[in-house]
Image (spheres, grey):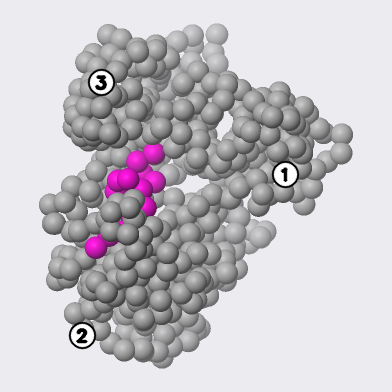
Amino acid sequence: MIHSDLVVIGGGPAGMAAAIEAKKNGLNDIIILERDHELGGILQQCIHNGFGLHIFGEELTGPEYAGRFIKEVEDLGIAYRLDTMVLDISSDRVVTAVNHDDGLMKIKAGAVVLAMGCRERTRGALNIPGSRPAGIYTAGSAQRLVNMEGFMPGKEVVILGSGDIGLIMARRLTLEGVKVKMVCELLPYSGGLTRNIVQCLEDFGIPLKLSHTITQVHGKERVVGVTVSEVDDNRRPIPGTDEYVPCDTLLLSVGLIPENELSKSSGIKLDRVTGGPVVNEGMETSTDGVFACGNAVQVHDLVDYVTQESRVAGKSAAQYVLGGDEADTECINTVPGDGVRYVVPQKIRRGRGAKLFFRVTNVYPNVTVVIKHGDKVVYSAKKLKVAPGEMESVELGADKLAGEGGQLNVSLDFGSAKK
Amino acid sequence: METVRKVICTTCPRGCHIDVTMDGSEVKSITGFTCKRGEAYARAECTHPVRTLTTTMKISGAALPRIPVKSKTPVPKEKLFDLMKVVNVVTVKAPVKVGDVLLPNACGTGVDIVASRNMPVVTK
């Protein structure tokens, strides 16, 4: 059995930032295990710009952002294995992995960082009725095919889902000469950034149909069209609003789910709402010495936040291995209150501060974010607008959280406005 | 004849709704912005809108057949499809380093198309 101080699972922005930070905090024996043929993760297919405004003060493309970290991994001499799949993590941190050159490996890890990213929801998850022809892709799969493998998925496309991936692909395909007929969005608002609505849809005259969904797929061997229907306040199709739209391709941009098959099989406690592991302010999971960061914990909007979160995980992992980290201490539990869907981290150890990340349940204008420790208000700030598609973050120093355990409630105060 | 164009500023997350009153192609007045950058953005959007082009180019001799590229600085929005035509006929050869100029002064815009990543030679 091989030994390694730190095994990082996933060589994308999360895994790389964690490994780099662990190295800078005194760990030398680190290995990154990556399933793709290169480091960089999902950023390698995100060829658009807008990354790095916080971390680098520049607007970079995905590959450029990844490139900065790949360079630092190389410069620091951090070991990594590519085309390597992790199959299992035992509760005593034995990592089983396999690749073509090394065969089957078992690595006993001083600490593990889970940085596997997330996966896309598929048509099966949505149960869209109709035949099952070729030509239905998740937007991310199509993005990989177009931007890296050099394949065009189709010529006349309908996109379901107005999150950023759907919007970005609407623009990408249009620039490559594809006719994007429309973007349908189930909810009455788009989950994507306003900037993307403007630069991906309005710029090209692509219609955005809010409160609409796909109710049937048509075609035998290949998609020939879809039926688009308007939905009511309960998201049920309204009879008589059906519209047949001819197309040869359907792209689905309908949600991301943290990748946690490994976490589940190793007994790590998951949060039902985020889909990722329950973590404390040091990004440690319910299993000793196993940390997690990035989209595997919660789906992020900004890679800059992923980097920040992952540095915390890397530093904590280093401190855990090198000793000197406190054993189980009492924790404050964070609780999502009114208007808040979830809060990460779910636990804050006594005597520590934390950077909280949370998402709201709906689009709300003019609200106040209120954080209470027991009865005491420890944070309060007015926001012009909050939306589910825009993750919020609040940094709380240890001094704000003094006192025994209890609960930290994060909620929205709607004042006199209706909820 | 005066028309009012509605612009949502994308410079910062505030997303101010800005009204630009135009007389033909001349800007008469701008209202609704809360900072200088917003005013400048709205003015540019109505007179000379620009966008950063991000796309891919064919590459030979690398691990993958496409390399991501971008316009070094924003280009006139109306030139995007002309630029795409020109970018898509080029095949570059590995090795390429991030920042390498792959198509200088594309379509006479004065803007270079540069590589967004390293792509070393890979012999298959």
Query: Position of A217 compared to A264: left or right?
Result: right
Q: Nearer the viewer, mark 2 or mark 3?
A: 3
Q: Position of residue A322 (x, y in %)?
A: 19, 79
Amino acid at dot 3: Val
Magenta highlight range: A31-45
Question: Who is closer to the viewer here, A348 or B36?
Answer: A348
Tally of numbered discs: 3
Question: Who is closer to the viewer here, A106 or B2?
Answer: A106
For mark 2, give the secondary structure.
loop
Q: Is residue A14 magenta?
A: no
Q: Dot 1: within a 10 Å radius of its alpha carbon, few (fewer than 14), some, or many (20 or more) residues?
A: some
Query: Position of B5 compared to B26: left or right?
Result: right
Quadrant housing the C terminus of chain A: bottom right
Which of the marked residues, 1 or 2, is nearer the chain's N terminus? 1
Q: Position of residue A114 (x, y in %)?
A: 37, 65
Residue receiving disc 2: A324
Q: Chain of mark 1?
A: A
Q: Dot 3: within a 10 Å radius of its alpha carbon, few (fewer than 14), some, or many (20 or more) residues?
A: some
Residue receiving disc 1: A128
